[in-house]
């Protein structure tokens, strides 16, 4: 994968994370406790995986080319 393609992938993942804000908002204002819990857990897992695992690894790979 070229460096430009890698940067596009990283940008797309960052945009994906940003687009989770509205579903998270809808879940947080739901009167249904189960919905709030499930959406909260889903969002927390996805955001944590993206921010602390996937995106940093891709950025490091893009920088080193290894």
Image (cartoon, grey):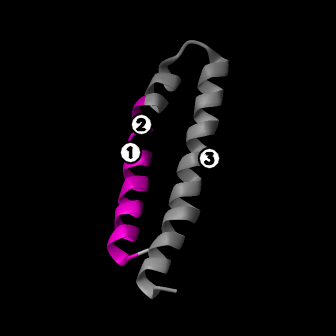
Disc 3, SS: helix
Q: Which residue is mark 1?
A: 18
Distance between the alpha carbons at the discs numbered 1 and 2? 6 Å
Instruction: Please rate how many residues cluster around mark 2, counting C-alpha atoms within 10 Å: few if below 14, some from 14 to 19, many from 20.
Output: few
Q: Which residue is mark 3?
A: 45
Point out the stretch of residues depicted in magenta. Answer: 2-22
Residue drawn at 49 percent across, 64 percent down: 55
Circle nearer the N terminus (1, 3): 1
Residue drawn at 41 percent across, 61 percent down: 9
Disc 1, SS: helix
Dominant secondary-structure state across the stretch colored magenta: helix
Taking 8 as reference, is 19 above or below it?
Answer: above
- Callout 1–callout 2 Cβ contact below 8 Å: yes
Distance between the alpha carbons at the discs numbered 2 and 3? 14 Å
Q: Which numbered dot is residue 42?
A: none
Q: Which numbered dot is residue 21?
A: 2
Q: Residue 27: give x, y in percent of width and height.
A: 52, 24
């Amino acid at each position: 994968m070229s460096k430009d393609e890698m940067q596009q992938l990283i940008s797309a993942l960052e945009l994906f994370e940003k687009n989770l804000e509205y579903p998270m908002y809808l879940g947080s204002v739901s009167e249904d406790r189960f919905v709030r819990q499930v959406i909260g857990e889903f969002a927390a897992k996805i955001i944590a995986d993206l921010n602390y695992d996937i995106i940093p690894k891709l950025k490091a790979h893009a920088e080193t080319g290894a």
